[in-house]
C-alpha cells in the first residue's frame, strides 16, 4: 500500500516535465500570435506587412509568395534582412504551494529577451517565363528567461524554440497578368528548456512531511530537434495596371523532436524517487501550423501605393503535446498537456510614399489575434491580442544597391493567468507585455 501511495504522488510530478516542455514550445517571445515569426522582410516591417505577398521590388517576397519572384525584374537579386526583436513581459500577481502558503521569490523580472532574426534571399530570372530563388529564414521561434528563484520557477526558467527554413522556390508566368509559384522547404526545429522541480512537494506525503514544499528544489532540462519537410503554393494576379493580388499557402510541417532529458536531484532525495528522474532520451510530436495569406497592393501614381493583408493561421491543430521518455518505466507517469488553441486572423494596412527617386517612406497598422484561451493559459504562454504600429524608410543608393529600415511597436493585451501546476503550485495574476522590432536590410541587383 505504501508503494502504491508513493507512485500516486510521483505520477503528477513526473508529468511536470512533459507539461513544461509542451508549454515552453509555445511561449510568446515571437512577434506574431503564438510562436509565429513574421520578421522576414524589412520593407514589409515598415508597413506592418501590408502587401507582403504582392508588393513589388522586395526580394523577400520569395518567402511570402514564390509566384512573385518572376516579377522582380531581369537582374538577379541578393538580399539580407536583419530584424532585432526586443520583447518585454512581466508578471504581476501571487502564488501558493501545496499547503496554501505563498511561494517564495520575486516575480521573475522581465522574461523577455532581445534577439536578432536574420534572413537571406537570392533570386534569378531564368527566362521570360521562369524564375527561381532560395532563402534561409525563421518562420517560428521564441525565447524567454525568468529568474531561477522567482515564484515562476516551477513552471519556467529558460525556454527556447526556433524553426529555420531552407527553401528553394520557382515561379512560372502564365501571362502578363498571372503567375504561379511554389517552394520546397526543409525545416529544422529545435527546442530547449529548463525549470526548477519542487521535490519537496513530490515527496511530502510519501515521507510523512519529512520533506516539505520548496524544501528540496532540483532542476530539470529538456533539449531536442528534428528536420521536417513541406512546401508553399502561391499566385500573383494583376487585374489592372495598378493592382496586384497575391495569395500564398504555407503547408503544416510535422516534427518528431528527439533529444535528452537531464535532471539535477538533491542527494538526499534521489534514493526516494524509485529510479525516476534519471537522465534519458525522449521525443515528442510537434507541428508548425499551416497558414494562408491574401494580399492586395494598389499603386495610385509614381509616388503613393497602399496595401492590405489578411492572414489566417490554423492554430487549432495544436491541441496537446505528449513527451515519450526512453525508459518504459516512465510511461505510467506521463500525460499530455492540453492547449486547445484557436485559429487566428491578422489584418494589416499600410503603404509607401516616394519622396523622390531615392527616398521612400512607409507606415502601417495591424491587429493580430492570439490563439491562446483563458482556460489553458500559463506563465509560459501569457500571449494576448496584439496591435502593431510601424514606420519605415528606404534609400536607393544606386541602380544596383538599396537600403531599408523599419520599426514596429506592439501593444499586447494582458495575459491573465489562474493556473495550477502538476506539483500543485497555483499562480494567479497577469502578464503585462510589449514589444519593439527594429529592422535593416540591404538589397543588391546584378
Image: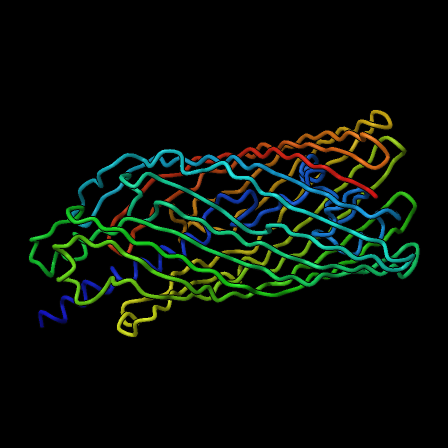
Residue 440 higher or lower than 279, as above or below: above
> Which quadrant: the C terminus?
top right
Residue 278 higher or lower than 162, as above or below: below
Residue at 82% from the left image edge and 54% from the top image edge: 236
Q: Position of residue 135 (x, y in %)?
A: 69, 52
Horizontal arrangement in the rendering, residue 103 relative to residue 209 (left or right): right
Q: Position of residue 239 (x, y in %)?
A: 89, 51
> Which quadrant: the N terminus?
bottom left
- Total labels: the figure holds 0
Comparing 364 with 199, the one in front is: 199
Q: Position of residue 78 (x, y in %)?
A: 75, 45
Horizontal arrangement in the rendering, residue 265 relative to residue 142 (left or right): left
The residue furthest front is 446
Residue at 43% from the left image edge and 58% from the top image edge: 339
Residue 321 higher or lower than 390, as above or below: below
Colour convention: rainbow
Comparing 24 with 386, the one in front is: 24
Residue 323 higher or lower than 163, as above or below: below
Residue at 73% from the left image edge and 52% from the top image edge: 62
Q: Position of residue 80 (x, y in %)?
A: 69, 42
Horizontal arrangement in the rendering, residue 297 relative to residue 205 (left or right): right
The residue furthest bottom is 328
Amino acid at each position: 500500500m505504501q508503494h502504491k501511495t508513493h507512485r500516486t504522488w510521483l505520477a503528477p510530478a513526473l508529468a511536470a516535465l512533459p507539461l513544461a516542455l509542451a508549454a515552453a514550445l509555445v511561449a510568446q517571445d515571437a512577434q506574431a500570435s503564438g510562436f509565429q515569426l513574421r520578421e522576414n522582410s524589412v520593407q514589409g516591417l515598415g508597413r506592418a506587412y501590408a502587401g507582403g505577398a504582392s508588393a513589388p521590388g522586395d526580394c523577400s517576397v520569395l518567402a511570402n509568395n514564390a509566384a512573385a519572384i518572376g516579377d522582380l525584374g531581369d537582374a538577379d537579386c541578393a538580399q539580407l534582412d536583419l530584424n532585432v526583436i526586443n520583447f518585454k513581459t512581466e508578471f504581476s500577481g501571487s502564488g501558493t504551494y501545496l499547503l496554501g502558503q505563498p511561494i517564495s521569490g520575486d516575480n521573475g523580472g522581465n522574461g523577455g529577451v532581445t534577439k536578432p532574426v536574420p534572413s537571406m534571399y537570392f533570386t534569378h530570372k531564368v527566362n521570360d517565363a521562369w524564375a527561381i530563388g532560395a532563402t534561409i529564414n525563421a518562420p517560428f521561434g521564441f525565447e524567454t528567461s525568468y529568474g531561477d528563484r522567482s515564484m515562476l520557477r516551477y513552471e519556467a526558467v529558460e525556454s527556447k524554440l526556433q524553426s529555420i527554413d531552407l527553401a528553394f522556390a520557382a515561379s512560372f508566368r502564365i501571362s502578363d497578368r498571372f503567375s504561379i509559384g511554389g517552394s520546397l522547404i526543409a525545416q529544422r526545429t529545435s527546442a530547449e528548456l529548463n525549470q526548477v522541480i519542487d521535490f519537496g512537494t513530490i515527496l511530502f506525503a510519501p515521507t510523512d512531511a519529512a520533506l516539505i514544499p520548496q524544501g528540496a528544489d532540483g532542476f530539470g532540462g529538456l533539449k531536442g530537434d528534428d528536420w521536417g519537410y513541406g512546401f508553399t503554393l502561391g499566385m500573383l494576379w494583376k487585374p489592372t495596371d495598378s493592382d496586384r493580388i497575391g495569395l500564398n499557402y504555407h503547408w503544416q510541417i510535422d516534427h518528431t523532436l528527439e533529444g535528452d532529458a537531464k535532471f539535477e536531484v538533491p542527494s538526499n532525495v534521489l534514493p526516494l524517487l524509485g529510479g525516476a528522474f534519471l537522465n534519458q532520451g525522449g521525443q515528442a510530436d510537434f507541428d508548425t501550423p499551416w497558414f494562408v495569406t491574401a494580399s492586395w497592393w494598389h499603386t495610385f501614381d509614381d509616388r503613393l501605393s497602399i496595401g492590405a493583408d489578411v492572414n489566417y493561421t490554423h492554430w487549432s491543430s495544436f491541441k496537446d503535446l505528449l513527451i515519450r521518455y526512453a525508459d518504459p518505466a516512465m510511461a505510467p507517469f506521463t500525460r499530455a498537456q492540453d492547449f486547445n488553441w484557436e485559429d487566428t486572423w491578422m489584418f494589416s494596412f499600410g503603404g509607401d510614399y516616394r519622396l523622390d527617386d531615392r527616398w521612400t517612406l512607409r507606415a502601417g497598422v495591424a491587429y493580430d489575434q492570439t490563439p491562446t484561451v483563458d482556460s489553458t493559459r500559463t506563465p509560459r504562454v501569457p500571449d494576448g491580442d496584439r496591435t502593431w504600429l510601424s514606420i519605415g524608410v528606404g534609400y536607393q543608393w544606386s541602380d544596383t544597391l538599396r537600403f531599408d529600415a523599419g520599426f514596429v511597436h506592439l501593444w499586447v493585451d494582458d495575459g491573465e493567468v489562474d493556473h495550477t501546476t502538476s506539483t500543485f503550485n497555483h499562480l494567479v495574476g497577469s502578464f503585462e507585455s510589449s514589444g519593439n522590432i527594429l529592422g535593416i536590410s540591404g538589397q543588391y541587383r546584378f
